[in-house]
């Protein structure tokens, strides 16, 4: 079945804004996951005195939604202070496009988080923040899991109540996810995305993700 896209999404996909790479950029990041098949690279020019994003470009390695959300995200952040951008919600790109199919909501998360990652690297470079070793707490872990979107519902797995157990023992992490019987097809994708997000944190020795059906069987 064909996905239904808004007029705005189609326009940004067919005629993306700010496409390419800035040659004289001072901030860059690539965000994405092979598990969902989408990646995006951003290059930014941030004024080091005013901390305003003066220019931004993107390159997409993914689907129509990936291109459209990255395109609208560059429009949203250009000319804004980095502290303002850091407060943006991950659904803002999708909202500006008039919504996305649930299975594509992860593209909005990717688009916004990619820009935030570039800003974070810029702040480290100028000494505005210190790249300290992260301590993983249950609250921090839940914030990470909010970037994992359930493909069927288009809602993150925390707000969708899929996470039934979180256990942290030292630097070892154990997570249990519960899915409806008709959602078992999404289990490999969700498991791999969780693994990749946590491994990127570089603060865990062992990551164990168990996914079970509401019938009680592990998937």
Image: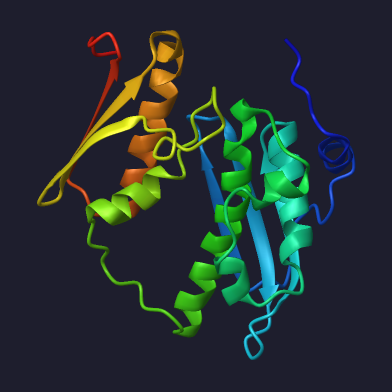
- Residue 202 in view, yes or no: no
The C terminus lies in quadrant:
top left
State the residue at coordinates (84%, 53%).
17
Residue 215 is left or right of residue 99, and the answer is left
Q: From the viewer's perspective, is residue 39 above or below residue 88?
A: above
Quarter of the rendering containing residue 198: top left
Instruction: Tell me residue 18's x, y (percent).
Output: 81, 57
Tell me if 129 is positioned left or right of 103 in this view. Answer: left
The residue shown at (26%, 66%) is: 133
Which quadrant of the figure has residue 64? top right
Residue 49 in the image: above or below residue 209 = below
User: Which residue is at a point 60% across and 35% down the rendered structure image?
Assistant: 38
**Where residue 169 appears, x then y in whole percent?**
9, 47
Can residue 87 be seen here? The reply is yes
If the image is split into quadrants, where does the N terminus sit? top right
Residue 147: where, in percent of width, then height? 47, 44
Instruction: Please indicate whether residue 142 sits to the left or right of residue 189 in the image.
Output: left
Where residue 71 appears, x then y in whole percent?
77, 50
Please tell me which residue is depicted at 61% across the width and 73% down the height of the picture.
Answer: 84
Give the residue furthest to the left: 169
Residue lying farthest bottom?
49
Q: Nearer the viewer, residue 159 or 110?
A: 159
The colour scheme used here is: rainbow
Does residue 125 appear to the left or right of 47 in the view shown? Answer: left
């Amino acid at each position: 079945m064909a996905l239904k896209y808004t007029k705005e999404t189609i326009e940004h996909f067919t005629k993306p804004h700010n496409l390419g790479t800035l040659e004289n950029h001072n901030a860059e990041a690539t965000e994405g996951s092979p598990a969902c098949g989408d990646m995006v690279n951003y290059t930014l020019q941030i004024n080091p005195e005013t901390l305003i994003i003066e220019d931004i470009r993107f390159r997409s390695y993914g689907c129509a939604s990936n291109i459209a959300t990255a395109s609208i995200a560059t429009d949203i952040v250009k000319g804004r202070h980095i502290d303002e951008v850091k407060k943006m919600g991950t659904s803002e790109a999708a909202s500006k496009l008039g919504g996305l199919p649930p299975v594509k909501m992860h593209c909005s998360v990717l688009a916004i988080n990619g820009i935030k990652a570039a800003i974070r690297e810029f702040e480290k470079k100028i000494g505005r923040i210190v790249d300290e070793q992260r301590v993983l707490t249950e609250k921090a872990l839940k914030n990470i899991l909010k970037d994992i979107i359930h493909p069927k519902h288009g809602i993150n797995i925390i707000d969708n109540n899929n996470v039934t157990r979180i256990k942290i023992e030292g630097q070892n992490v154990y997570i249990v996810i519960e899915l409806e019987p008709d959602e078992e097809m999404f289990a490999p994708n969700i498991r791999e995305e969780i693994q990749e997000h946590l491994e990127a944190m570089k603060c865990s020795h062992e990551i164990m993700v168990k996914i079970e059906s509401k019938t009680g069987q592990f998937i």
